Image: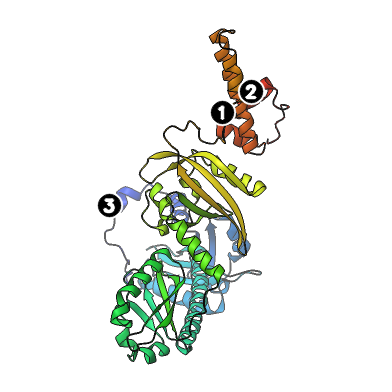
Amino acid sequence: MDKQVFREVSRSFRSHDDLFSGLGAEALGALATANSDIALVIARDGRIVDIAYRDRTLKAWHLDDWVGKLWKETVTSESQNKIDELLQESVKASPTRSRQVNHPAKSGGDLPVGYRLVSFSGWQHKVALGSDLRPMAEMQQRLVRSQIEMEKDYRKLRDIESRYRILFYLAVEPLVVVEAQSLKVLDANEGAVRLLDKPVKKLVGTSVASLFAKADQQRASEALAVLGARARADVFRARPATSDEHMEIRVTPFREFGRTNLLVCFSSEEPAKPSASAGSDSTMISMVDHLPEGFVIVNSQGNVVQANPAFLDLIRVVTLDRIEGKGLDTWLGGSGVDLQVLMANLRDRGTVRRFASVIRDELGGSEAVEVSAARIETAGGQLFGFAIREQARGDGGQAGSVGMQSGPATQFTELVGRVPLKDLVRDTADVIEKLCIEAALRLTDNNRASAADMLGLSRQSLYVKLKRYGISDLEDADS
């Protein structure tokens, strides 16, 4: 028999006799089991003499029935040649290279195992050390499924892109895609090529100002820059570089890969004459933009839709896009309750006047303000408009209040001289406390949790005060 070659051993033990001479058969069996998930003792004729395994789940493949069978009979037909190759290789090398074989199951999937054969001089049997490859097989299957899903998604995106490009290039009107920040042309369709008398390659990368007549370049660039910053669709008139006639320039912003682009459409149609109502709406919008008081519009979730420059000055923000889509309670109110109270009252009553609150800016400052608000119904749902002005230095209102009647104060001043000041101050504090609790309950529509938050009290403290002043029955309605 040829001398065996031991594979993949960079350094072997130098004193086998001293180190392992005391180890018995039990220790060798333990080493074989610890080094593998399945350990087989193989006779010279290829039969399985004994088997050891650690994982209880392997019993589903009836491993105990393998004892006495030929090793190659326990594997699938395509794996039998690998068993023969392992047995042949073990004659010349120990341990052998690892080979993966599959053991069939009576029901369910096959059991993949990677085996190495180890031979010992002077011993008639061989040991097959097997590693359970099910985790690796499952990982490979997940990888294949993920790749298939990625291919499906990629195919969908490719189809969408193809449809977009077909529609873009076949459109009759001249269309140009412009990057909002740099105002550079990203793409153009055949209609734009015919209008501007330049191929697409020469248009891409040029400044959008070059598409317009010299007299209109600055105005067009400024209009596009403003529309890109505010992400608002609009229309203006300008002359293209190849014509002396004014055209209607329709600009539609859209988001792509995390940036804002502009779809610029050149239309030769004369714009419709604005009606009186349209002119009135335009005048109203212009007037709101020039108001010294802050004005902001939010949707039904309380997120900012539009705001005028005065509101941006109040919160120390430069452009609208920095706050668009964010909750108004980020800046308005001493706590999140203020905006909830305002919007609850707006939904019930439609308007709120002179609501005292606080505005917080981006630099950490705060300012006492007075808020008036109204609700409007639109085709897209309810919108809420808030007019916010700074309180005069002499105003004594507190945030979250709607003003206090002067009747009780007048009654107390009439008691001066007839009642000791100490008793008068104590009774005055009780009356003010009761009025504040009643005002908070009215503003929160009897929501005691919100009222307690607005007043800076715990719910238990609020219940005690409700019972003390006899404002209402002590019922934990919100628990």
On screen, 321 above or below 88? above
Q: How far across and down, in percent of the image, does residue 151 sit?
A: 49, 77
Mark 2 closeness class: few <14, some 14–19, many ≥20 residues within 10 Å:
some
Nearest the eye: 182 or 410: 410
| Residue 190 showing in the rendered view | yes
Quarter of the image that includes the N terminus: bottom left
| Residue 138 showing in the rendered view | no
Report the residue marked by disc 3.
Answer: 15
Report the residue marked by disc 2.
Answer: 465
Nearest the eye: 155 or 346: 346
- 108 left or right, relative to 71: right
Going from the N terminus, do you reach mark 1 or mark 3 first?
Answer: 3
Report the residue marked by disc 1.
Answer: 457
Q: Are the residues tagged 1 and 2 within 8 Å (C-beta)?
A: yes
Q: How far across and down, in percent of the image, does residue 197 sit?
A: 34, 92
Q: How far across and down, in percent of the image, does residue 88 sit?
A: 42, 75
Which residue is at a point 63% across and 38% down the rendered structure image? 444
Q: Secondary structure at mark 3?
A: loop
Most distant residue in the front direction: 276
Which residue is at a point 56% across and 11% down the rendered structure image? 416
Which residue is at a point 51% across and 68% down the rendered structure image? 279
